Image (cartoon, grey):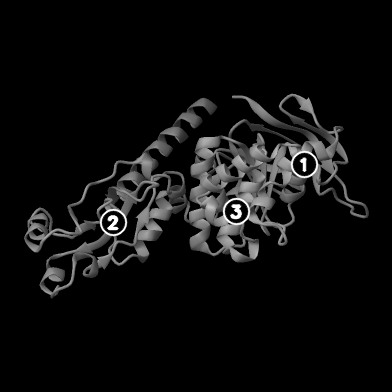
Amino acid sequence: MTIKIRLENLTKRFPGEREPAVDSLSMEIPEGEIVILVGPSGCGKTTTMKLINRLIEPTSGRIFLEDEDVTKVDPDGLRRRIGYVIQQIGLFPHMTIYENIATVPKLLGWNRAQISARVDELLTTIGMDPATYRSRYPKELSGGQRQRVGVARAMSADPDVMLMDEPFGAIDPITRDRLQNEFLRIQSEIKKTIVFVTHDIDEAIKMGDRIAILRDHSHIAQYDTPEAILVDPADDFVAEFIGRGAGLKRLNLSRVNDIEMSECATVQAGADRDEVRRALGETDRCVLVLDEQRRPRRWVNADHLELVGGRSLTEIGLPADAVVRPYSTLSDTLNEMLVADYATAIVVGDDGVYQGVIDIDTINEAVRGMRAAERSRLADRLGEGG
């Protein structure tokens, strides 16, 4: 394991304050991982993150980026090496999306062709067509789209390290889940080292490779993987911060592509009624109607066929609305199932093409497997301690 960031006895005392905001914090952040700083309001997590790129100057202690002590280097140069995303996004309203994303590359002296190619690459990565969005202004985008552009701008100079201060905190819950999933998909490809601040333990569990739960003054209560913290909290403070429902929180630790999907009966949207009935003969439930590109459209059962009249298969039945991606968490998948008209989640790829389904029995089986694995890990730890 390569350590990308190392903090040694990092301390910050603000003038006029009796207690330090950050008190002698030491921690190591591995390369290519998302490390979450989480804790109660006022515990110092945002101050700690801002110390890393010296938006706030430390009172004492040292900051190492790889093996370089960056405590005394030029802070502007340091910040250009580190991407930064904040909750309020911070896009420049008078600049186009292209100009916003191009800000740091311009400061670094990239030529116009390099910048243009990088902007288009990033817009494509975050799922926004460059031809459609590069000339728009922030006010013309939704909140979720502006947040995506904020992430793209932080990645514009291809930094090794990114700092994210509650980046999804000001977005509605449905959009937040989707953006979290999209970011995790991107991270699986780019493998940046990310320090991520949140006040939400569920978000920490979902997003983090490691979680640092902080007490006041950024004292570390526990720094470990989400699995270890859920199974074996270090003390009552950590257990209380995690809260009730640890079993449900574990659903944020597994993703759709970690478990075995099921198949369901499918028909093409142009199928005739006899073909649908033959497919229904193989199941006592519903048949999934797919369009010409094998994208899910509707759920249809025998009762729907009786009421069909002259309507097509894409106009009857129930909407195929519980759609998830392979990198969605089981928690997201369960949430989609609970609010859908038909309580089965449909798994599709990034191209929207059908891959399989997940039902409640599949999730129950996954939870049982997690419990067994966690009991085994806990027994191993106790054995090592003995």
Under tag 2, what secondary structure? strand
Q: Position of residue 172 (x, y in %)?
A: 54, 65
Q: Can you identify the residue that label 1 sits on?
A: 107
Residue 81 in view of the camera: yes
Report x, y in % for residue 372.
37, 39
Q: Which residue is disc 3 drawn over?
A: 134
Inspect the image, locate mark 2, and give the three-letter code of the amino acid beneath it: Pro
Q: Hey, which quadrant is residue 219 in on the image?
A: top right
Mark 2 to mark 1 CA distance (whole Å): 46 Å
How many numbered markers are drawn?
3
Measure the C-alpha gap from mark 3 to mark 2: 31 Å
237 vs 289: above or below: above
The residue at the point 25 percent across, 62 percent down is 298
Binning the other alpha carbons within 10 Å of mark 3 as few (below 14), some (14 to 19) or many (20 upward) gives some
Specify the label residue 273 is tagged with.
none
**Three-letter code for the amino acid on which mark 3 is drawn:** Arg
Q: Nearer the viewer, mark 3 or mark 1?
A: 3
- Earlier residue among tags 3 and 1: 1
Do callouts 3 and 2 mark residues in contact (Cβ within 8 Å)?
no
Give the residue number, with chain letter if any, for mark 2: 296
Vertical placement of residue 308 versus 73, above or below: below
- The image quarter in which residue 1 lies: top right
- Separation of marks 3 and 1 at Cα, in angstroms: 19 Å
Give, as a three-letter code, the residue at label 1. Leu
* Disc 1, SS: helix
